[in-house]
Amino acid sequence: MPGFGRSGRHTALLSATAAVLLVATACGSGSGSSSSGAIKIGASLPLSGPVADASKPAYEGYKVWLDQLNKNGGLLGREVELKVLDDGFDQNTVVTNYNRLISQERSDLLLGTFSSRLNLPASAVAERNKMLYVEPSGGAEEIFSRGYDYLFFAQPSTSLDLPEQFVQYIKSLPADQRPKTAAYPTQDDPNTDVTINEFRKELTELGVKTVYSEKYAPDTVNFDPIASAVARAKPDLVIHGAVAANDGAGLVKALQKQQFSPKMMYQTNAPSLIGSYPKAIGAKNTEGIFTSAAWSPNADYKGNAEFVKAYTQAYGSAPGDDAANAYTAGQVLEAAVKGVGSLDQDKLADWLHSHTVQTIVGPLKWDARGVPDGDMLLAQWQSGKFEFVAPAAQKTVDKAVNPKPGWSS
């Protein structure tokens, strides 16, 4: 529990930058921390840079939540305004942005940014200022190992649990259908590091031999050397720690150049970008590729169907995981404010530590670190659709595609 006063709030020093200020329209000009006018929520997102394709849906998810919130009366009888700064996927800029949101923009509430790489330093700013920080992504274990009181994750579980459903699927296969060897190319990122290490550990325990394991820099655009090395190793299974569609697609395209198609392939994050991923690699080439997701559009959780309808009407296509996770973060923040009846940051954190929140990813409750206790879903592209193959309660297809067919071109 926090157990702190609010004396440290709004005291962070501002480092002026030329960050772009975006305002999600929500009516009115807020007066910051005053008790009247619009309530101001601040957030930073990498709307430019290498993961912009993934953060744009997150921003849209925030805006859908905000629009619904204001149509239903806002918070505490006041309209709500969301201000988003662009951090360009830069750790220094995201720190500057949250300092600015707190000390200059005088945000009443905060929402998190995208990825573990950014949420790691951004959550430290919020904690130092004793402000609630609900993050829509960023499941790296190290984020939650610092004893923070104001940090909460708005997905069912963290990166450490991502391999669980896929490894269980491997265990369910007859011995002669299991992969014998695996390659682990991964972007150097706090989130993918944890996931890939856990994959390698659990698959090794199953007897799957590692034949390739290397990290690449976040700004990598040429995946030919990586694909060449993977192709020479000839793994049955490729586990790729991708962060966005560009590196997920980059490796697939490079493997095609090498005319190497593994029997099984799992990528983190990238395949869940249902708007951009099939376009990037070709719809036929998605067939059989696995990933994990926090949310299903088919789940029968309260408000889920309304979210899917509202997002689709607003943006002309169905939402994906990143949009849903941002929407969920908004739901968590909303529940805390309504539950407490004020913007007192200590009380908001205490309330979340002691209550379960009903969201579109299911009921969420957190331990003392801000880690939820749910399960991720195992998804797979099949016949041009993003399907769910586990757990059984959320399956949308009878079985997984195995082995993965070769590349179409």
Image: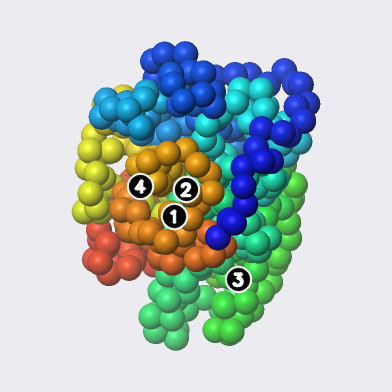
Question: What residue is pinned by disc 1?
Answer: 352
Can residue 150 be seen from the camera position used here?
A: yes
Mark 1, secondary structure of its residue: helix
Q: Residue 17 vs residue 113: left or right?
A: right
Q: Residue 372 vs residue 115: left or right?
A: left
Q: Position of residue 21 (x, y in %)?
A: 59, 19
Q: Residues within 10 Å of mark 1 (few under 14, many from 20)?
A: many
Question: Is tag 3's residue or tag 4's residue first in the polypeptide sequence?
Answer: 3
* Most foreground residue, 33 or 243: 33
Nearer the observer, disc 3 or disc 4?
4
The amino acid type of the residue labelled 1 equals Leu
Question: What residue is pinned by disc 3?
Answer: 198
Question: What residue is pinned by disc 4?
Answer: 339
The amino acid type of the residue labelled 2 equals Leu
Tell me how far mark 3 sits from mark 2, CA to CA: 33 Å
* Most foreground residue, 33 or 306: 33
Tags 3 and 4 touching, CB below 8 Å: no
Question: Is tag 3's residue or tag 2's residue first in the polypeptide sequence?
Answer: 3
Tell me how far mark 4 sits from mark 2, CA to CA: 8 Å
Q: Position of residue 368 (x, y in %)?
A: 54, 65
What's the coloring here?
A: rainbow
Tags 3 and 1 touching, CB below 8 Å: no
Q: Is residue 171 above or below residue 292?
A: below
